[in-house]
C-alpha cells in the first residue's frame, strides 16, 4: 500500500527484465486503480532499474511519483502481489513464453 512518499503510486509487473504491465493503484493515499497515465519517462525509469535489480523471473516493482520524480518503493515476488488493473492475460502470456524458453 501507500507509504507516504509520493502522490501517485504505480505497480509494474516484470518478466525477464521486460515491463509487461503497469497500472496506478493509488493517488494521494486513496485507492485509484487504472492502466491509464503511464508516461514514457516512467517506462524509461522502470527499464533502467530492471537492469540493476537482481530478481526472479517474474516480479513486481512499486513506484511512487512525487513532484515529477520517481522513486522505487519496493520490489516483491510475483506470486504474493496484487495485480490491481495490470493486464493479467499479458502477464500470463509473458510467463508462459518465458517458461517455454527455459524448457527448450
Image (cartoon, helix red, strand yellow):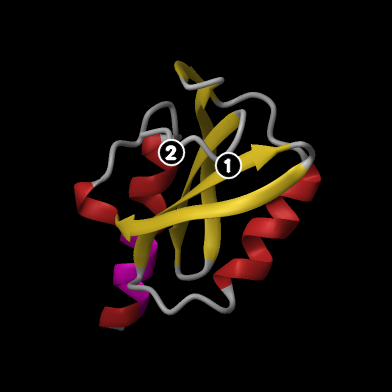
Screen quadrant of the C terminus: bottom left
**Overall secondary structure of the magenta stretch?**
helix
Expressed as whole percent of the image width and height from the top left, the position of residue 56 reads 33, 73
The residue drawn where x is 69% and y is 27% is 37
Screen quadrant of the N terminus: top left
Please report whichever mark, 2 or 1, sits nearer to the chain's N-terminal start: 2
| Disc 1 residue crowd, few under 14, some 14–19, many 20+, Cα 10 Å | many
- The magenta segment is 95-101
Circle 2 is placed at which residue position?
3
Expressed as whole percent of the image width and height from the top left, the position of residue 101 reads 37, 76
Q: Quick check: is 35 in the magenta stretch?
A: no
Kindly identify which numbered label has been placed on residue 78: none
In the image, is 2 to the left or to the right of 70?
left
In the image, is 86 to the left or to the right of 40?
left
In the image, is 64 to the left or to the right of 60?
right
| Disc 2 residue crowd, few under 14, some 14–19, many 20+, Cα 10 Å | few
The residue drawn where x is 35% and y is 36% is 83
Per the image, label 2 sits on a secondary structure element best described as loop
The residue drawn where x is 63% and y is 58% is 46
Per the image, label 1 sits on a secondary structure element best described as strand
Q: Do the residues labelled 2 and 1 touch (CB within 8 Å)?
A: yes
Q: Nearer the viewer, mark 2 or mark 1?
A: 2
The residue drawn where x is 39% and y is 47% is 91
Expressed as whole percent of the image width and height from the top left, the position of residue 94 reads 42, 56
Front-most of residues 27 and 12: 27
Front-most of residues 34 and 26: 26
Circle 1 is placed at which residue position?
64
Quick one: which residue is furthest to the left in this view? 80
Q: Distance between the residues labelled 2 and 1?
A: 9 Å
Q: Quadrant of residue 52?
A: bottom right
Expressed as whole percent of the image width and height from the top left, the position of residue 71 reads 61, 52
User: Vertical placement of 39 versus 62: above or below?
Assistant: above
Amino acid at each position: 500500500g501507500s507509504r507516504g512518499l509520493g502522490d501517485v503510486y504505480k505497480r509494474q509487473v516484470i518478466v525477464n527484465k521486460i515491463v509487461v504491465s503497469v497500472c496506478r493503484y493509488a493517488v494521494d493515499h486513496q485507492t485509484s486503480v487504472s492502466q491509464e497515465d503511464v508516461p514514457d519517462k516512467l517506462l524509461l525509469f522502470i527499464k533502467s532499474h530492471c537492469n540493476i535489480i537482481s530478481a526472479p523471473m517474474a516480479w513486481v516493482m512499486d513506484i511512487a511519483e512525487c513532484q515529477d520524480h520517481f522513486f522505487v518503493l519496493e520490489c516483491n515476488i510475483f506470486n504474493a502481489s496484487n495485480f490491481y488493473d495490470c493486464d493479467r492475460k499479458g502477464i500470463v502470456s509473458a510467463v508462459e513464453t518465458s517458461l517455454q524458453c527455459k524448457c527448450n
